[in-house]
Image (cartoon, helix red, strand yellow):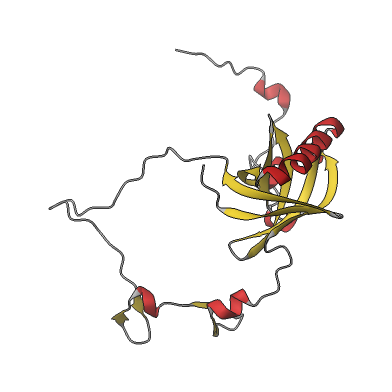
Amino acid sequence: MRSIWNGAISFGLVSIPIKLVNATESHSISFRQIHTEDGGRIRYRKFCELEDREVTQGEIGKGYEDADGTIIPITEEDLSSLPIPTAKTIEIVAFVPGDRIDPLQMDAAYYLQASGAPAAKPYTLLREALKRSNKVAIAKFALRGRERLGMLRVVGDAIAMHGLLWPDEVRAPRAWPPTRVSPSATRSWTWRTP
Protein backbone atom coordinates (compact mmCIF):
# COMPACT_ATOMS: atom_id res chain seq x y z
CA MET A 1 0.00 0.00 0.00
CA ARG A 2 1.23 3.46 -0.89
CA SER A 3 1.45 6.03 1.91
CA ILE A 4 -0.60 9.20 1.52
CA TRP A 5 1.04 11.12 4.39
CA ASN A 6 4.28 10.89 6.36
CA GLY A 7 4.72 12.33 9.81
CA ALA A 8 4.82 11.26 13.44
CA ILE A 9 2.52 10.26 16.29
CA SER A 10 3.30 12.55 19.19
CA PHE A 11 2.35 12.47 22.88
CA GLY A 12 4.37 13.96 25.67
CA LEU A 13 8.05 13.51 24.86
CA VAL A 14 7.39 10.52 22.59
CA SER A 15 7.50 10.88 18.81
CA ILE A 16 6.93 7.87 16.53
CA PRO A 17 7.65 8.33 12.80
CA ILE A 18 4.78 6.82 10.80
CA LYS A 19 3.25 6.51 7.35
CA LEU A 20 -0.48 6.87 6.78
CA VAL A 21 -2.17 4.52 4.30
CA ASN A 22 -5.83 4.17 3.34
CA ALA A 23 -7.54 1.34 5.20
CA THR A 24 -10.41 1.07 2.74
CA GLU A 25 -10.90 1.00 -1.01
CA SER A 26 -14.00 1.59 -3.06
CA HIS A 27 -15.28 -1.11 -5.38
CA SER A 28 -18.25 0.90 -6.58
CA ILE A 29 -18.86 1.20 -10.30
CA SER A 30 -18.80 4.70 -11.70
CA PHE A 31 -20.65 5.66 -14.83
CA ARG A 32 -19.95 8.41 -17.35
CA GLN A 33 -22.67 10.65 -18.69
CA ILE A 34 -23.09 10.26 -22.42
CA HIS A 35 -25.19 11.76 -25.18
CA THR A 36 -27.80 9.07 -25.89
CA GLU A 37 -27.99 9.80 -29.62
CA ASP A 38 -24.31 9.26 -30.48
CA GLY A 39 -22.57 8.00 -27.31
CA GLY A 40 -20.43 11.14 -27.01
CA ARG A 41 -19.16 11.84 -23.51
CA ILE A 42 -20.75 14.77 -21.68
CA ARG A 43 -18.20 17.13 -20.12
CA TYR A 44 -18.56 20.08 -17.83
CA ARG A 45 -16.88 23.30 -18.84
CA LYS A 46 -15.78 26.00 -16.41
CA PHE A 47 -17.06 29.48 -17.22
CA CYS A 48 -16.24 32.81 -15.63
CA GLU A 49 -19.60 34.42 -14.89
CA LEU A 50 -18.18 37.97 -15.21
CA GLU A 51 -16.54 37.50 -18.62
CA ASP A 52 -18.95 34.80 -19.87
CA ARG A 53 -16.12 32.73 -21.29
CA GLU A 54 -14.61 29.31 -20.70
CA VAL A 55 -11.45 29.36 -18.54
CA THR A 56 -8.54 26.95 -18.31
CA GLN A 57 -7.54 25.09 -15.14
CA GLY A 58 -4.52 27.41 -14.81
CA GLU A 59 -6.84 30.41 -14.53
CA ILE A 60 -8.83 28.92 -11.65
CA GLY A 61 -8.00 29.79 -8.05
CA LYS A 62 -9.71 29.64 -4.67
CA GLY A 63 -11.80 32.24 -2.91
CA TYR A 64 -13.72 32.55 0.32
CA GLU A 65 -17.25 33.95 0.11
CA ASP A 66 -17.96 36.42 2.88
CA ALA A 67 -21.42 36.76 4.48
CA ASP A 68 -22.24 39.70 2.20
CA GLY A 69 -21.34 37.72 -0.95
CA THR A 70 -17.92 39.32 -1.47
CA ILE A 71 -15.33 36.83 -2.75
CA ILE A 72 -11.93 37.13 -1.10
CA PRO A 73 -9.19 35.51 -3.23
CA ILE A 74 -7.00 32.98 -1.37
CA THR A 75 -3.69 31.87 -2.88
CA GLU A 76 -1.74 28.66 -2.30
CA GLU A 77 0.88 30.85 -0.56
CA ASP A 78 -1.82 32.13 1.82
CA LEU A 79 -2.84 28.56 2.65
CA SER A 80 0.72 27.28 3.06
CA SER A 81 1.57 30.08 5.48
CA LEU A 82 -1.34 29.26 7.81
CA PRO A 83 -0.01 28.00 11.13
CA ILE A 84 -1.33 24.44 11.40
CA PRO A 85 0.44 23.00 14.46
CA THR A 86 -0.38 19.43 13.45
CA ALA A 87 0.90 19.72 9.86
CA LYS A 88 3.20 16.68 10.17
CA THR A 89 2.10 15.33 13.53
CA ILE A 90 -0.73 13.20 14.84
CA GLU A 91 -0.91 14.80 18.27
CA ILE A 92 -2.57 12.60 20.88
CA VAL A 93 -4.60 14.76 23.24
CA ALA A 94 -6.46 12.16 25.33
CA PHE A 95 -7.01 8.47 26.00
CA VAL A 96 -10.67 7.49 26.47
CA PRO A 97 -12.81 4.32 26.52
CA GLY A 98 -13.80 3.43 22.96
CA ASP A 99 -17.50 3.39 23.77
CA ARG A 100 -17.36 7.14 24.44
CA ILE A 101 -16.97 7.78 20.71
CA ASP A 102 -20.25 8.22 18.87
CA PRO A 103 -20.13 6.14 15.64
CA LEU A 104 -21.86 9.04 13.86
CA GLN A 105 -18.60 10.98 14.22
CA MET A 106 -16.50 8.36 12.38
CA ASP A 107 -15.18 9.25 8.96
CA ALA A 108 -12.43 7.77 6.74
CA ALA A 109 -10.17 5.02 8.09
CA TYR A 110 -6.39 4.73 7.77
CA TYR A 111 -3.64 2.40 8.95
CA LEU A 112 -0.58 3.85 10.64
CA GLN A 113 2.65 2.04 9.75
CA ALA A 114 5.89 2.43 11.67
CA SER A 115 8.31 4.32 9.46
CA GLY A 116 11.52 2.32 9.62
CA ALA A 117 13.20 0.12 12.21
CA PRO A 118 13.77 2.87 14.85
CA ALA A 119 10.00 3.51 14.96
CA ALA A 120 9.04 -0.16 15.43
CA LYS A 121 9.64 -0.32 19.20
CA PRO A 122 7.73 2.84 20.26
CA TYR A 123 4.97 1.94 17.76
CA THR A 124 4.65 -1.51 19.36
CA LEU A 125 4.66 0.00 22.87
CA LEU A 126 1.81 2.39 21.95
CA ARG A 127 -0.16 -0.41 20.28
CA GLU A 128 0.21 -2.67 23.32
CA ALA A 129 -0.67 0.15 25.74
CA LEU A 130 -3.87 0.84 23.80
CA LYS A 131 -4.70 -2.87 23.67
CA ARG A 132 -4.11 -3.49 27.42
CA SER A 133 -5.95 -0.39 28.57
CA ASN A 134 -8.99 -1.02 26.33
CA LYS A 135 -8.85 2.63 25.38
CA VAL A 136 -8.54 4.63 22.21
CA ALA A 137 -6.43 7.71 21.64
CA ILE A 138 -8.03 10.96 20.52
CA ALA A 139 -5.72 13.00 18.33
CA LYS A 140 -5.51 16.12 16.20
CA PHE A 141 -3.86 15.94 12.78
CA ALA A 142 -3.79 17.93 9.55
CA LEU A 143 -4.59 16.38 6.20
CA ARG A 144 -5.08 18.27 2.94
CA GLY A 145 -4.52 21.62 4.64
CA ARG A 146 -7.18 21.21 7.32
CA GLU A 147 -6.83 20.30 10.98
CA ARG A 148 -8.94 17.29 11.84
CA LEU A 149 -9.86 15.09 14.78
CA GLY A 150 -8.95 11.40 14.83
CA MET A 151 -9.27 8.25 16.90
CA LEU A 152 -6.44 5.71 17.11
CA ARG A 153 -7.35 2.13 17.95
CA VAL A 154 -5.77 -1.29 17.63
CA VAL A 155 -6.81 -3.55 14.74
CA GLY A 156 -4.94 -6.85 14.79
CA ASP A 157 -1.24 -5.95 14.87
CA ALA A 158 -1.76 -2.46 13.51
CA ILE A 159 -2.87 0.91 14.77
CA ALA A 160 -5.79 2.25 12.77
CA MET A 161 -6.88 5.86 12.75
CA HIS A 162 -10.43 6.91 12.04
CA GLY A 163 -10.97 10.48 11.05
CA LEU A 164 -13.64 11.94 13.31
CA LEU A 165 -16.10 14.67 12.56
CA TRP A 166 -15.96 17.54 15.01
CA PRO A 167 -19.00 17.41 17.34
CA ASP A 168 -20.62 20.44 15.67
CA GLU A 169 -20.49 18.65 12.28
CA VAL A 170 -22.94 15.94 13.42
CA ARG A 171 -26.56 16.92 13.02
CA ALA A 172 -29.05 16.27 15.80
CA PRO A 173 -31.71 13.71 14.84
CA ARG A 174 -35.14 14.94 13.93
CA ALA A 175 -38.29 13.23 15.10
CA TRP A 176 -38.56 10.34 12.59
CA PRO A 177 -41.11 9.05 11.82
CA PRO A 178 -43.08 12.28 12.04
CA THR A 179 -45.99 10.62 13.82
CA ARG A 180 -45.77 8.75 17.09
CA VAL A 181 -46.66 5.07 17.08
CA SER A 182 -46.93 3.09 20.28
CA PRO A 183 -44.77 -0.06 20.49
CA SER A 184 -47.89 -2.18 21.03
CA ALA A 185 -49.21 -1.12 17.60
CA THR A 186 -46.18 -2.66 15.92
CA ARG A 187 -46.65 -6.12 17.46
CA SER A 188 -49.17 -7.18 14.79
CA TRP A 189 -46.62 -6.76 11.99
CA THR A 190 -44.95 -9.92 10.79
CA TRP A 191 -42.04 -10.05 8.42
CA ARG A 192 -42.24 -12.86 5.92
CA THR A 193 -39.55 -14.01 3.61
CA PRO A 194 -40.49 -15.23 0.15
Residue 144 visible, this orientation? yes
Q: Residue at x 19, y 54 (%)?
A: 35
Looking at the image, which residue sits at the far left? Answer: 38
Point out residue 105 in the picture as x, y percentages from the top left corner.
69, 47
Point out residue 34 in the picture as x, y percentages from the top left corner.
23, 53
Q: Residue at x 62, y 55 (%)?
A: 6
Q: Quadrant of residue 97?
A: top right
For residue 22, side relative to residue 48 (left or right):
right
Depth order, front residue of 28/82? 82
Depth order, front residue of 131/192? 131
Q: Is residue 2 above or below residue 158?
A: below
Residue 102 visible, this orientation? no
Q: Is residue 176 above or below residue 7?
A: above
Q: Quadrant of the C terminus?
A: top left
Point out residue 119 in the picture as x, y percentages from the top left corner.
72, 45
Point out residue 12 in the picture as x, y percentages from the top left corner.
87, 54
Q: Residue at x 73, y 38 (%)?
A: 153
Depth order, front residue of 192/37? 37
